[in-house]
Every structure is written in C-alpha cells, then in structure tokens.
C-alpha cells in the first residue's frame, strides 16, 4: 500500500511539474509600425528556441518584406538580461550579407533604445533597386534562457516600447520595392499549454486527491 501511495505521489508531481516547466520555444509577432503603407499587422515573427544552455533566434518576415539597412535603424534590435556581446553569433541570413553587433544603446526608432543592435556589415542594402535581403535572420545567444529576452526597450517614441524591432522594406512584387521603416513586437502572449500538458495536470490533480483521501482513511 505504501508503494502504491508513493507511485501516485510521483504521478502527481510529474503532472503538476509539467505545467510549471518553462516553454522550450516561443513565437513573438511583429505587430506595430509607423509606416502606413505596410498595412495591418502582423509583419513577421521572432521565434526563440531553447537549445541546451543557449537560445536560437530565428526572425522570419511575411512574404512582402525584406530586411534592409536605412538611416539610424538596425536590421534587428533586442535586449537581454545577463547577455554579453560575446554570447551572440554566428549571425546569418538567406543571402551573402555579414553582420556585426552594437551594444549598448542600439536605437531603433520609433521603438526606442535596445541593449543590442544587429547591423549589416557587408553586402548591405538600403532598399531601392537593391531590394533588401531575404529572411530568415538567425543567430544563437549562449548562456541564456528565453525569459532573459522579455525586456522592453527604453526611451521609446509614439508607438511605445518594444521587445524586438527590425528594419524592413515592403516589396510590391518580386521586382518592385517600396516603403522602408521599422516594425516592432510590442506585446507578448503567454503560450497556451498543449493538450498533453492539460492531461498531465488533470492526472496530477486526480492522483493528489486520491492520495489525500487514502491518508484521511488511514489517519
């Protein structure tokens, strides 16, 4: 009987623990811009995946956009708790571009100042006939967890602070390119647990109730 009780307690712990586990991957959607020509959101997403002791960033734009380098904007900006420049890399996109990292105070208006800014170093484009460069933009940040990057920018403009921002160009079709400007992620959504997680939670609660009932009877 004691063994059975221990087994049920273990099931309860596993079921409840599954709900408390941090997400292994999260998507954050670009939902804000000051460029009216970009139309209604969303404009792409930032996917963060926990890979061992680091986080993989994968920035994917909607089909009508390319990355671009204009004015004082960065290709991509973000902040992170306990992150150093040396933790970031390698940085790649779908083209021949190379990139560098600027820190601190990586300004990406109108979304404010971020801790890190990824800038194009070679084969860069300001839009126009060059058309920008294709996504995805990918890199890894070592010694980090997904929660480390839920940090809002400071000194934001009229669109408010953002978690991430990117400089993009809108392409009317595969040949013609149009407006350029920044897009940002200003809100985050708590991930919805998978059905299997709910099942584990219910199993854990049921096992805890059974264990409690057995203990009352033997008290």
Image (spheres, rainbow, N blue to C red):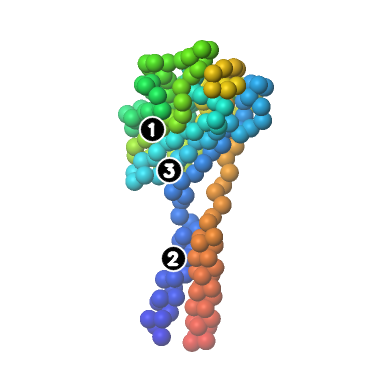
Q: Compared to 171, does 128 lie above or below?
A: above
Could you tell which of marks 2 and 3 lies nearer the N-terminus?
Answer: 2
Decide: is 9 above or below 95: below
Residue depicted at x 53% and y 27%: 165
**Disc 2 + disc 1, Cβ < 8 Å:** no
Q: Which mark is residue 173?
A: none
Quadrant of image for the N terminus: bottom left
Counting from the top left corner in percent of width and height, residue 154 is at: 54, 26
Q: Distance between the Cα atoms at labels 2 and 3?
A: 23 Å
Image-quadrant location for residue 170: top right
N-terminal label among 2 and 1: 2
| Secondary element at image label 2 | helix
Real-space Cα separation, disc 2 to disc 1, in angstroms: 33 Å
Given residues 68 and 210, the one toward you in this image is 68
In the picture of the structure, the residue carrying the numbered disc 3 is 49
**Nearer to the camera, 188 or 157:** 188
Tell me if I can see residue 117 in this picture: no
Q: Nearer the viewer, mark 2 or mark 3?
A: 3
33 or 157: which is nearer to us?
33
Residue for badge 2: 14
The residue drawn where x is 41% and y is 81% is 4
Question: Compared with residue 45, is residue 212 higher up or lower down, i.e. above or below?
Answer: below
């Amino acid at each position: 009987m004691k063994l059975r009780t221990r087994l049920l307690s273990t099931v309860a712990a596993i079921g409840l623990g599954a709900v408390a586990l941090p997400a292994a991957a999260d998507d954050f959607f670009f939902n804000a811009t000051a460029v009216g020509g970009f139309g209604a959101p969303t404009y792409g997403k930032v996917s963060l995946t926990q890979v061992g002791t680091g986080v993989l960033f994968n920035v994917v734009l909607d089909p009508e956009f390319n990355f671009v380098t204009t004015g004082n904007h960065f290709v991509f900006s973000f902040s992170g708790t306990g992150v150093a420049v040396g933790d970031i890399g390698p940085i790649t996109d779908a083209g021949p571009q190379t990139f560098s990292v600027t820190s601190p105070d990586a300004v990406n208006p109108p979304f404010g100042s971020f801790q890190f800014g990824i800038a194009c170093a070679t084969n860069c484009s300001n839009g126009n006939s060059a058309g920008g460069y294709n996504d995805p933009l990918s890199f890894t940040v070592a010694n980090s967890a997904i929660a480390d990057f839920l940090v809002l920018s400071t000194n934001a403009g009229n669109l408010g602070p953002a978690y991430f921002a990117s400089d993009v160009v809108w392409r009317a079709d595969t040949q013609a390119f149009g407006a350029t400007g920044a897009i940002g992620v200003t809100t985050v959504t708590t991930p919805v647990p998978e059905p299997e997680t709910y099942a584990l939670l219910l199993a854990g609660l049921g096992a805890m109730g059974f264990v409690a009932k057995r203990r009352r009877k033997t008290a």
